[in-house]
Amino acid sequence: MLILEVWDHDTFGKDYTGRCILTLTRVILEGEYKDCFVLDEARFGKLNLHLKWVPQPIYRDS
């Protein structure tokens, strides 16, 4: 599961804009995935994501 929180940083401080929660199942199965997600708890805004899954080999000492 991937949880992304978006904050607006400016001269007046930082303001919470919203968040997006998604699973990585589709990314893992397809290897690469692009989509646009609406931010939860936000008055406006969406997040354009381009995700790519690159498995890393696990080396074990024998």
Image: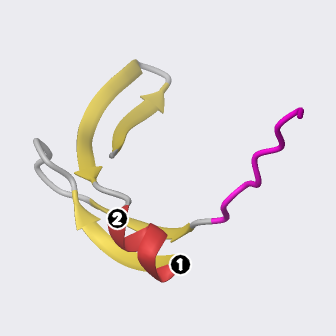
Which is more foreground, mark 1 or mark 2?
2
**26 is higher (above) or lower (below) than 61:** below
Furthest residue in direction right, as rendered? 62
Q: Residue at x 31, y 73 (%)?
A: 36
> CA gap, disc 1 to disc 2?
11 Å
Residue 32 screen position, x and y as percent: 53, 78
Residue found at the very far top of the displayed protein: 13
Q: Nearer the viewer, residue 19 or 52?
A: 52
Callout 2 amino acid: Thr
**Range shown magenta:** 54-62
Q: Earlier in the sequence, mark 1 or mark 2?
A: 2
Is 57 one of the magenta-colored residues?
Answer: yes
Element carrying mark 2: helix
Query: What secondary structure characterizes most of the magenta part?
Result: loop
Q: Is residue 51 left or right of residue 3?
A: right
**Quadrant into which the C terminus falls:** top right
Secondary structure under tag 1 reads strand
Q: Which is nearer the eye, 56 or 7? A: 56
Numbered badge on residue 32: 1
Nearest to the observer: residue 48 or residue 23: 23
How packed mark 2 is, by other alpha carbons closer than 10 Å (few <14, some 14-19, many 20 or more), is few
Question: Is residue 50 on the magenta stretch?
Answer: no
The residue at the point 10 percent across, 49 percent down is 43
Q: Identify residue for label 2.
A: 25
